[in-house]
Image (spheres, rainbow, N blue to C red):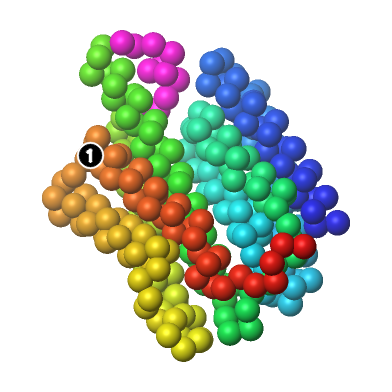
Amino acid sequence: MNHALVSLACHAYVVAALVYLVYLVRQMDALATGGRVLVGTGLALHGVALVGLFGAQGGRPVGVAQGFSTFAFLLLAIFLVVDVCYRKPVIGAFITPLAVAVLLPGLLLDRGQVLSPEVQRPLLPVHITIALLGVAASAVAAGVALMYLLMERQVKGKRFGLLFSRLPSLEFLDTLNRRLVVVGFIALSVTLVTGAFFSSAAPGFFWTWTSKQIATLVAWAMFAALVGARSFGGWRGRRVALLTMTGFGLLLVSFLSSYDFIHVSGGWR
């Protein structure tokens, strides 16, 4: 049942992605509204499925498939909030295809993995959700940064083509990037603190310099420097966009290696 709901949600997301891509070429209010309804419907179905899955597992996460699924859910939830608040549906042309690409492995991978007993702790789902929220916020920030770079290139080259007339202003994209980076940085900071607690669940786990830990720490330091440079150094524009995308790349490495860190066991079935 839960898998069927996620599958239906994925179909809604795919159609929404196509709608937003069409909106990028032909901006019509009906397309924007249709995209929001599709994403909202998909999130409702997806949310019910995730709650049902967590309940069936006794509140414990199970592995990489659910990680991809939750990441896609949070990614689209953040986008929908941004779209509703700022009325910039064109962002969906960059975010919804990414969310579909993330969700598909969650549908195709086996759902039978379980965590080792050492790290099956009551608040672990909260820690993982906050971590995925930070990655999702950074992903949307990276998408906005990409839009900024595309827009800036057209402005500097004085080639005012399709993207120039469709994308939001450079000032708006820079401001939105700043707000998303702050959200991602806060979530990442909480993740590092709570991660130390859960890492101590097993002897020798506290800090072993795994690729996940190194990537997360470097990404955190980069976002910390970025937030500081924006707040106190007045950094804006291209270099901020490039650093945002680099930071997200590091977080992606951390995300993909995270299930080695929590010792997923049980194998593929």
Q: Residue at x 54, y 16 (%)?
A: 25
Q: Amino acid at mark 1?
A: Arg
Q: Quadrant of residue 9?
A: top right
In the depicted structure, whether residue 258 falls above or below residue 21: below
- Where is residue 235 shown, x and y percent of the image? 18, 44
Q: Residue furthest left?
A: 233
Residue sitting nearer the eye, 245 or 268: 268
**In the image: residue 33, left or right of residue 186:** right
Q: Quadrant of the C terminus?
A: bottom right
- Where is residue 266 shown, x and y percent of the image? 70, 71
Residue sitting nearer the eye, 16 or 105: 105
Residue 167 forms part of the magenta stretch: yes
Residue sitting nearer the eye, 81 or 4: 4
Q: Is residue 242 visible?
A: yes
Q: Residue at x 72, y 49 (%)?
A: 107
Q: Residue at x 40, y 37 (%)?
A: 144
Q: Badge 1, how many Cα within 10 Å: few under 14, some, many 20+?
A: few
- Where is residue 6 shown, x and y percent of the image? 75, 50
Write down the residue under mark 1: 239
Residue sitting nearer the eye, 85 or 77: 77
Find numbered disc 1 in the image and state the secondary structure of the residue it sits on.
helix
Q: Residue at x 64, y 26 (%)?
A: 18
Q: Residue furthest bottom?
A: 203
Magenta stretch: give its range.
159-169
In the depicted structure, whether residue 108 falls above or below residue 268: above
Residue 134 forms part of the magenta stretch: no
Q: Is residue 197 visible?
A: no
- Where is residue 234 shown, x and y percent of the image? 16, 46
Q: Quadrant of the N terminus?
A: bottom right
